[in-house]
Image (tube, rainbow, N blue to C red):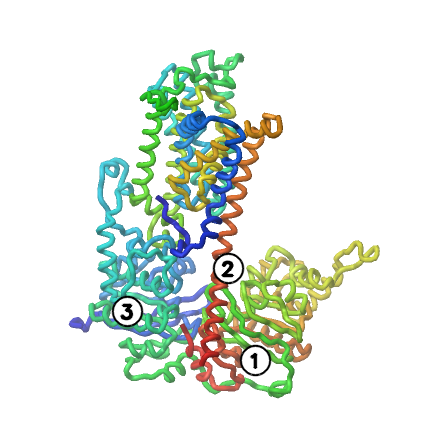
Amino acid sequence: MGNEQVPLLEVRNIKKDFFGNQVLSDINFTLKEGEVLGFCGENGAGKSTLMKILFGMDVIRETGGYEGDILINGEKMNFSTPFDAIHAGIGMVHQEFSLIPGFTATENILLNREPRKGNIVAEIFGDRLTTLNYKEMKEKADAAIKKMGVEISADMVINQMPVGHKQFTEIARELSKDELKLLILDEPTAVLTEKEAEALLDSIRGMSRRGIAVIFITHRLHEILSVCDKVVVMRDGLVVKDIPAKDTSVPEITRWMVGRNVDNEAAKEEPVKKKGEAKVIMSIQKLWVDMPGETVRNVSLDVEEGEILGIGGLAGQGKLGIPNGIMGLYEAGGKVIFDGKEIPLNNPRKCLDASLAFVSEDRRGVGLLLDESLEWNVAFPAMQIQNKFLKKYLGGLVQWRDEQAIRQVTEKYIDELQIKCMGSKQSAKELSGGNQQKVCLAKAFALEPKFLFVSEPTRGIDVGAKALVLNALKKFNRESGVTVVMISSELEELRQTCDRIAIVSGGRIAGILPAAQPSEEFGLLMVSQVR
Amino acid sequence: MNKNKVSTKPSRSIGELLRDNSVPLMFILICAVCIPLSGFSPSYLLDEIITRMGRNVFLILSLLIPIMAGMGLNFGMTLGAMAGEIGLILASDWQIVGIPGMVLAMIISIPISMFLGFVCGTILNMAKGREMVTSYIISYFINGIYQLVVLYLMGSIIPIIHNSIKLPRGYGIRNTVSLLEMRQKLDNLIPLTIGGVKIPVATFIVIGLLCVFIIWFSKTKLGQDMRAVGQDMQVAKDAGINVEKTRIISIIISTVLAGFGMVIYLQNMGNLATYSAHSQIGMFCIAALLVGGASVDKASIGNVFLGVILFHLMFIVAPTAGAKITGDSMIGEYFRVFVSYAVITVALVMYETKKRKAKSRAGEQLAADQAAEEELSEEQ
């Protein structure tokens, strides 16, 4: 670290908004050669966006670019594509694997950078007809694997590898690039076993000794403390702390992460019924769900009648898998007993018939009929499932839609939820995100269910709409006595709305706490079993 | 060549092996039943099979490269076949006969094939994930243009000298163009007969060269890119491979090869059915490839040869066997068409089920993990 004056990477006053929604404001930090920087923060704190900016991802440019400067070795950079970033010496290992499944580790490590041999045909028809130099490929791949310091087989085909090895293949690919100066690892240990994670940490120390700077994003805070020189904590688009790793501890970082005003407005009124008095309306036993990226493992959970139960946790830990699995949208196994009867899994219709309703987190894909009117959107499921809003003629032989009843109920909900629209005939796709979310709720309310799953009800909507949606849910629960299970990434929102909160970590329930508990307790549960 | 073996675990059960190869096995069974019934001598069957291999293998090999690039079965090979036919029509009008005529026909077909392949590839890039049905429909679309050119433009705008291939009205090409001067010229170039079985040595040499080309090609940078694009377009794109261009090139190569293949096919037949020769060719080639055990995303040179042998063996023996059983010789022709479509349908359905199976395996794994975990906790 001879050159103290010019850091390898300097980030100056980075700002970024997505269509007026400020996600990053005034980000500043520096990174020296060979330094390891730990990055932590809750979901939505802005870590991913910042990394996307650093790596010149297309999505940033498409959404209007960013403000502020990125300097590498004191030189101002302006990446228009990830290839520019790679050229400047930045490597990134993404959360999702970016590997060709049928190729060997060697082929993947050197993908599109294969050493080649010339031949006559290539002289005539161009460079792409040169043949691959398999011997040199093997040598280069082996060298990269050796550099990493973790043993993986270079000849193994990716789709036969355990997950950890795929992760290492990705890292080796970045290390095989000669120009690499800065490596960004986005939650690399999330898919690793304890032993593999330990090997990775060793490998990071090795890279740092070799002069490669590393930005290490993880939810496993103890890893940060064991390997990083410096910790940067982000919250709500701000850097709240930038501190040498040796001066801090896990509880401290957790507090910074979930922070806000720690003892705030949490659970307000007393729960309707005291714990133990209420009967269990839904009992989930040994549930597994195969939802890509949200795998659920062995979850057992009792939901009491009339309560609002929150399910929280970090992204990718499986909280979304629970409602999606129970409602039959992804393959699931285990046992779900609702109101004394077992509900067959993998059969959405049976769930709906049992008077369950689900407001999906994917409102454009699953939640709405985008091209249809609000009336249709609100009334459609009730019409399909419960034969509501139908007029019967000839003794039920012919059924007509009861347009008037449909309009009435739609207008009632437009009023109640303050859906901003031009009338009940407007098509759903013309509404803003927040109002679309309200339509999804109206749709579920129109079913008059006994039990309601609400998944990420406030994702991507503004503060005003957020309060309204949450209040509508609360009102629906208290007035109609409907049991609500609300899944959300935002802890504060759960604490304001729910009676009890279950935290999912590593696909399992890490614990269930009353909403009034302090944020740190939840924070610790969130990272407890991350894997 | 294409090593996209999907989860070939070392401990593959016999059941799985049977299921993976069910189509070829089914055909082996059909042939085993029909051969004794038909009463043909082994040497006759061998002679027929060898002839048909020489005739068809080149065409079928042209399907391999798009499969490698993940574009499925290229029904658009018909486009190349049409280009080859145009080449042959012109070459025979100019009265260039024998091997030079064939070579000329191939040379004429190259620019036409390249253009059509480019058009087809560009359209298929707009319909990613639905390449097969799109290329199938494109083949009908281009067939219309082919008919326009051959039926109206040839003789009126494109000069056609000889009346023998022109329609009596003065423009347009006759229903049949005789290729008598070219007939089996390549097959007989190096005459060789073993035990009464005639072997088209020169044709086989050409086919052998193409096989070598395909194997060599899969080791080039372009071949490697195609395999990468075929397996995951997004990953390939992120690595800096030009996905669209790579896909277009694979269709162009396939179309050009199909054009050559059609010339070889027709020199063996000895005449050209101007308006129908190409219409079923894509279907039969694809059916033969699938019979050989290929699937939508995986095919090898071995599949091609096995497929040709089994598929055509059935064609040879089924009519006679059918006639022996039912007393009606038409049944064989009917059988031929019916089976081709059936094979394609079955293979496509099996491909989808296999994909779904692989998906549900992840769920089974989760359930198994959970069970193991419980056992462990009970022991403690």
Between label 2 and label 1, give the one nearer the viewer: 2
Give the numbered dot on residue A498: 1
Give the Cα distance between marks 2 and 1. 35 Å
A71 displayed left or right of A365: left
Q: Chain of mark 1?
A: A
Dot 3 or dot 1: first in sequence order is: 3
Task: Please tell me whether mark 3 sits on a helix, a strand or a loop.
Answer: strand
* Dot 3 crowding, Cα within 10 Å, few <14, some 14–19, many 20+: many
Look at the image and tell me whether residue A242 can be seen.
yes
Seen from this angle, which residue lies furthest left? A2
* Dot 2 crowding, Cα within 10 Å, few <14, some 14–19, many 20+: few
Same chain for labels 3 and 1? Say yes or no.
yes
* Residue occupied by mark 3: A214
A252 displayed left or right of A452: left
Look at the image and tell me whether residue B112 can be seen.
no
Give the Cα distance between marks 2 and 3. 38 Å
User: Residue B190: image x %, image y %?
Assistant: 31, 22
